[in-house]
Amino acid sequence: MASPDLLHELFHYPLFEAMLGRRARRFGLGMEIPSGPLAYRSRHAPLPLSTLERDLLLLAGTGVSGWSFGVPHGPDRPDEHAHYSLRYTGRTAPTAGGFGTPALLFTDDDGIHFLNTRDIPPEGMREYRGEDDMARLLALMRDRVETLSPRRLDLPAAPPHMLEPNLWMANAPGSTLFMPIGDASEQVLALLAMAIGNGNTPMDDELGRPAGDLAPFQRSGLLREEKRVPLSVLQQMAYEGNCAELAMMGHNMVLTMQAMGLGGLYFNGLNRWSILGAFADQGIAGAGFRFQRDARWTLPNPVGLDGLYESLCPPYYPDMHTAVAAFVARKFGPGGAYDATTPGPWRRSREVKGGVTPYSEEFVACLGEVAQYIHDKHGKFPGTFTTIVLPGFVQAVHLDTDFYDRHYHPGAYLASHAEHLRRWHSGEPGGA
């Protein structure tokens, strides 16, 4: 357990020193590069992260720090607070429009674990209050970590499960591999609600037609025929938004690793289907996510983790109309984002939330029509990419400074790395 003085120094570590000192330092205790000019075998046993080290990285990636301020204004409802946000949970990494879809999967020598902070009840939230609040923030996450398996992720160190440059180091003993994931079904529904709320007609630009039977909604004035948003662009925006959010979670963690003196990196090149469990029938269990299969697809589609992280689409709902109803309830139902009986970031939260008009039956029907059109056309939702998004990874290790002393110029690692084992682990590689 680190001393209070060490945590104080970590809390005040210079941001620019962490950014300018950030490098991909892959070689950890217990690792080996088998050949080539940098061939080296560590003289030390692998050393896993301590619980505190792990929890600090979880806090950096997805920690709850207070309230999200959401999107305060929209032109479609000029006299109300905007209706776009889905959650008002403020976290260490941003999410588009206050949608708040990401969560964090991770694996270490103790198993496979899952952390979802996106739905922490608002009544349990308060703004971060400085260094003395760290224990509360750490506990808030630690209490929500679910262990999915007592064994490390069984990701084979071979193609197609890993790209060749990662075979020697990815998911190695002693490492902690963090895998930020996003729910694209919520992301697309939230963007569609924003588009429809502003009168845009969603278009299937591949076929050159409206995305569903939208003529009744155009006749009523809910949608405007001349305002068109291509589904291809909207779904691409959702994918880009998910990827950006998850990458920022990872970058927060990597910057924190510099301050703590941990080695590791942000990277890609691991097979998300293998990780999530698409090949369980071939003996590679992965993380146990549910998949759907369809003859139209080359690869199966991951849709969620039963009971823990279920997307807003079949098979968790019988159809997209039902999924849309659940999405609307998350906004306007009991405990939802705009439930006036729940607190918020504003001085007059009851007035702000209570002034947001719930979606009309017509609006919900229109949103359901478009969502069902996408699902019917592609057999999944979203239609053009996976429902669960997993674009990149963070691996944390205890750095083997001997390797860098042997092969690199002085300055290849920071003072925090040089001092880490002495200060966090009583000095000895492999010691506690």
Image (tube, rainbow, N blue to C red):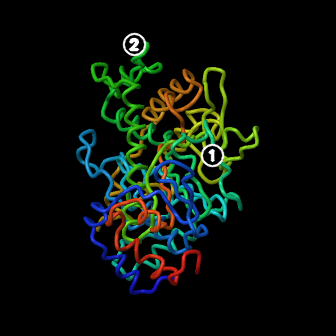
Q: Which residue is mark 1?
A: 157
Q: Quadrant of the C terminus?
A: bottom right
Q: Nearer the viewer, residue 203 or 398?
A: 398
Q: Residue, x 42% and y 31% (percent of image)?
A: 235
Q: Amino acid at mark 1?
A: Ala
Q: Is residue 285 shown above or below 423?
A: above
Whether residue 90 is visible here, answered yes or no, is no
Q: Gap between marks 1 and 2, in whole Å?
A: 45 Å
Side (left or right) of 356 relative to 26: left
Tell me the SS state at disc 2: loop
Mark with earlier residue (1, 2)? 1
Q: Residue, x 59% and y 75% (percent of image)?
A: 430
Labelled disc at residue 208: 2
Q: Amino acid at mark 2?
A: Gly
Labelled disc at residue 199: none
Tell me the SS state at disc 1: loop
- Count of numbered labels shown in the rendering: 2
